[in-house]
Amino acid sequence: MLRDREVGDGRKGGGLHEDRHDGLPGGGYKDLHGDRHRSRGRTGEIAGCLFWAALGLIMLAGMRKVGLGPKKAVAAGLVIAASVGIHIRRMKKTPGYVRKILGLETGTDRGQGAGAGSVGEGRPVDCGASGRGSAGRRKRIYEYDWLRTMAVVMVIVTHAVQMDMAEGMVPEGAASYWMTVLYVFCLSCNLIYVMLSGALLLPYREEKLSDFYLRRLAKVALPMLVYFVFYLWIDGELEQIGPHTPGWILSRFFQGDTPESPHYWLMYVILGLYVVVPFFRYLFKDLPYKALTAMVLVSGICMYLTTYSPIPCAVNPLLSSWIGVAVTGFWVTKKETRRYDKLVMAAGLLGLGITMYCIRTREDFLAVCCNCSPTMLMIAAGLFSLVFSAPKLFSKGNAVLSLLGRYSFSLILIHWIVLFFSTRVVFTIYTSQYLYIGGILAALSVTLLASLAAAFFIDQLVVVTVEAVYDRVVEGGRWVVKKVGKMEVIQKRKP
């Protein structure tokens, strides 16, 4: 934007753009530039409107091609049209809006705290690795984007390999062993997501309990529900829609009855953590670092006892569950932990070695090496320390990293069905092809790109409208509560 005043000759009013020209009242030089700026603004608005309208038509045409019926297409068209209208209105108010939507803005971030404070907003605070820009905005922590991207890659790889092994596409022997090691290692993505939630949400900050829950509902539960509807539609379970259908969908979603999207179990784990996070913030607010470190060690010991103890233990400590994983994420991202990075990475290598041994010697290796097992926790913590211990590599961002970080949660939600269609229906890709490495990279690349495209369209042309309706409902509810409160006060004041 052109500034009205620039550095001039030092005299009052002597700025460059204060120059007056005869015959051009009010300063012709400035007006000409103002007209040019307004013209550019109008051109940008027109281009933006065409951009969003084109995206809406592309999505509607794609859904029709996949099999959306005429009546359902009308309903989908209304939702998409509403989303386009929302984007056009926001675009007029927000400079660089499209760049922000595409995740192309780097440098600062207004809200790295994720529903994504974890996974959900894709834009989750420190805990030791954060800073602030000169304008008071949080400096974007690219290490979190790297970890999100790493987790997205790992979840696609582990599911691609598991799918091929289940179909017998990987021969027995050395190939089967190393592919098993790969997909079990990649299962540490589950812990990365939970640890990110702990790292980004457990730090204390003032936030009303209702605001916390409403925000996480909007940023995590609502997108989950929208993507679940897409899974049901693609699976052919929405052929007949009636008055009972919304209740049926909500009932299944509430109960976690989501076999069409089996990976949703992790999202329910994270939602469960959100229930206790606001209260844990007070617990950790003044907790000394040594006490926090001891808590993490106790958590690891509890996991060991519940996983490997030869004598079953009737006591199942809270810290041996996903709570302990979240607390570890909070601990490993604190700046005081940087002195232990080498030790934590060594523990991660030890955990990987034990996992490889268990895969070779035990039939139940998945039970003793995955999720809330001490070996998997060691691996995930080692990856965190690896990222935070190398700022020259991981403290810098780029457009691709920002884009993947922004849509990481949606990529997780949609990747399952995209993986199947991209490697089995559209293309024939197996991880065992092209000397395994080529097959893994091919499956990963195709699935990642297709998932990113699908996530972008669903987020921007469906979820945005659902969230807007939700925001209006919440605002209406708060207005009603406020009015009722005022009426109660008036009634009490009456004699």
Image (cartoon, rainbow, N blue to C red):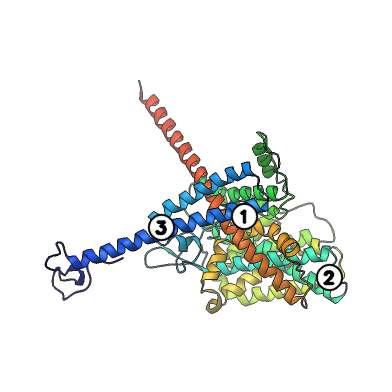
Residue 376 falls left or right of residue 98: right
Disc assigned to residue 62: 1
Query: The N terminus appears in which quarter of the rendering?
Result: bottom left
Q: Residue at x 57, y 73 (%)?
A: 388
Residue 235 falls left or right of residue 38: right
Mark nearer the N terminus (3 vs 1): 3
Three-letter code for the amino acid on which mark 1 is drawn: Gly
Mark nearer the N terminus (3 vs 2): 3
Query: Residue 261 in the image: x percent, y percent?
Result: 71, 52
Three-letter code for the amino acid on which mark 2 is drawn: Val
Within-10-Å neighbours for mark 1: few <14, some 14–19, many 20+ = few
> Taking the image as drawn, is residue 371 in sight?
no
* Front residue (pair 413, 294): 413
Three-letter code for the amino acid on which mark 3 is drawn: Ile
Query: Residue 450 in the image: x percent, y percent?
Result: 64, 63
Does the CB distance between marks 3 and 2 fall below 8 Å?
no
* Front residue (pair 146, 29): 29
* Front residue (pair 308, 250): 250
